[in-house]
């Protein structure tokens, strides 16, 4: 028996509706809409056009989240997120028949698969049955599946596109931050070079921005101050703390202030800025051209190496105190004074240099450095050789921290 003209007309109308709905969605997607607008169109098709009042969508972004809930209890999404039975659903399934009954008052679950992985689940609940005894869900199940796949994959693409834009913006911000930080750290050409003293520096942040800092400050015509510092940890937070530290050091480090007083104030400033979450190791020194005296404090930093080329004597500069920001008050601060009577080289660095690993995964420490500076060559040549032999400028994959070096040559 052939269908009545009324049924044929109704089927034709429904077919036209579905085609128009798909066309409308396709046009909307091509216009690059927001995720919110796409969801509004999707909900309209389900609620108004197909008269399905109970529908719920959970979607995987970074985590599984509820994107839409109409007609179900508020706690329904929380029950579904992370539900192992739901995550096993790979095709349209009747809840309680094809799958465990993991949600009351729900009838069907439609998984949305993208790149062979589920990215969303559409949960549908039945309402009034139509005259032929079939619910709107059953009558339009395949169409709902098609529509869901188109909409949710489009939403996923919008999300990924927005993430890519965010990554580009973040990359540009990091590049700008890197340039700004580099401006705060003096390059080799700007360092003092006189008949009394010469400086040579090297800086290689592991990320775009880093937590290392060195500086050379002219205190007077006959005195210069310099430092090497390293923030615990890496990344943006370390870079921000170090920028704050640099501003404080530059404002406070003058000819008149004693190094012991300067270190105590810096400790207070780091505590205030870092709230005890980070600390800074610091080697701080000043040198007088007339008296030939080198005064220093080592605040928990890797001991710099001092090599007297005449006496062929190598020393480690260890005297000082604990790192900045480790304790509310420094229990002791030891200042050491060294008279530099002959040509002497000083090599100070951050721990990224000595944490490079060899093939046997053993830290090579300071022995390599000691061997490379214990000679009559200039400190500049010594540093260049260390950088070359360790492949620091050539993409050494063993590097996992910032590397900074400050070499000083006293004449």
Image (tube, rainbow, N blue to C red):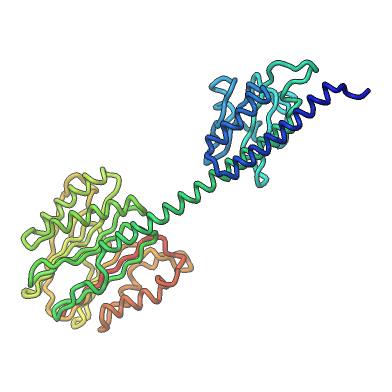
Position of 234 with respect to 316 (left or right) is right
Please give the name of the residue rendered at 31% of the width and 70% of the height, measured from the top-left corner.
202
**Which residue is located at x 73 percent, y 26 percent?**
94
Is 25 above or below relative to 227? above
- Relative to residue 11, is residue 393 drawn left or right? left
The front one of 43 and 306 is 43
Q: Position of residue 258 (x, y in %)?
A: 8, 59
Out of 199 and 309, give the one closest to the viewer.
199
Of the pair 184 and 313, the residue shown nearer to us: 184
Whether residue 99 can be seen here: yes
Q: Position of residue 203 (x, y in %)?
A: 32, 67
Q: How many marks?
A: 0
Which is more toward the observer, 210 or 348?
A: 210
Locate residue 89: give its quadrant: top right
* Occupied quadrant, residue 157: top right
Residue 17 place in picture, x, y as percent: 71, 31
The relative height of residue 332 versus residue 42 in the rendered view (above or below) is below
Residue 88 at least partly seen: no
Q: Is residue 390 left or right of residue 228?
A: right
Task: State which quarter of the image contains the C terminus.
Answer: bottom left
Report which quarter residue 18 is drawn in: top right
Residue at 68%, 37% (x, y): give it: 22
Could you tell me which quadrant the N terminus lies in? top right
State left or right for residue 174 relative to residue 283: right
Q: Residue at x 21, y 62 (%)?
A: 283
Q: Relative to 5, is 255 above or below?
A: below
Q: Give the residue furthest to the right.
A: 1
């Amino acid at each position: 028996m052939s269908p009545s003209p009324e049924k044929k007309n109704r089927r034709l109308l429904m077919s036209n509706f579905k085609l128009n709905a798909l066309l409308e969605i396709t046009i909307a997607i091509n216009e690059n809409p927001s995720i919110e607008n796409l969801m509004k169109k999707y909900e309209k098709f389900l609620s108004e056009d197909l008269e399905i009042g109970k529908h719920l969508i959970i979607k995987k972004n970074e985590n599984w989240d509820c994107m839409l809930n109409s007609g179900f209890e508020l706690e329904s999404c929380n029950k579904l997120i992370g539900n192992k039975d739901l995550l096993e659903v790979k095709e349209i399934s009747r809840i309680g028949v094809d799958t465990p009954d993991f949600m009351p008052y729900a009838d069907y679950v439609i998984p949305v698969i993208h790149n062979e992985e589920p990215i969303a689940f559409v949960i549908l609940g039945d309402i009034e049955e139509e005259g032929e005894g079939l619910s709107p869900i059953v009558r339009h199940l395949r169409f709902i599946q098609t529509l869901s796949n188109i909409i949710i994959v489009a939403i996923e693409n919008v999300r990924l596109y927005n993430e890519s834009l965010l990554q580009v913006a973040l990359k540009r911000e990091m590049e700008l931050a890197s340039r700004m930080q580099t401006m705060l750290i003096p390059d080799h050409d700007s360092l003092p070079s006189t008949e009394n003293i010469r400086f040579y520096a090297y800086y290689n942040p592991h990320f775009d921005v880093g937590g290392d800092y060195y500086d050379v400050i002219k205190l007077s015509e006959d005195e210069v101050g310099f430092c090497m510092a390293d923030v615990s940890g890496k990344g943006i937070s370390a870079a921000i703390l170090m920028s704050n530290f640099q501003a404080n050091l530059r404002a406070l480090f003058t000819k008149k202030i004693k190094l012991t007083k300067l270190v105590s104030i810096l400790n207070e400033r780091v505590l205030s800025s870092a709230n005890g979450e980070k600390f800074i190791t610091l080697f701080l020194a000043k040198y007088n051209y007339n008296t030939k005296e080198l005064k220093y404090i080592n605040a928990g930093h890797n001991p710099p190496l001092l090599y007297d080329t005449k006496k062929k004597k190598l020393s480690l500069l260890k005297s000082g105190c604990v790192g900045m920001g480790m304790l509310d008050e420094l229990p002791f601060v030891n200042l050491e004074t060294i008279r530099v009577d002959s040509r002497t080289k000083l090599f100070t660095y951050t721990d990224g240099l000595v944490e490079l690993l060899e093939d046997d995964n053993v830290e090579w420490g300071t022995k390599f450095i000691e061997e490379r500076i214990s000679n009559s060559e200039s400190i500049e040549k010594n540093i260049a050789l260390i950088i070359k032999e360790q492949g620091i400028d050539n993409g050494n994959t063993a590097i996992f921290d910032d590397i900074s070096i400050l070499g000083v040559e006293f004449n």
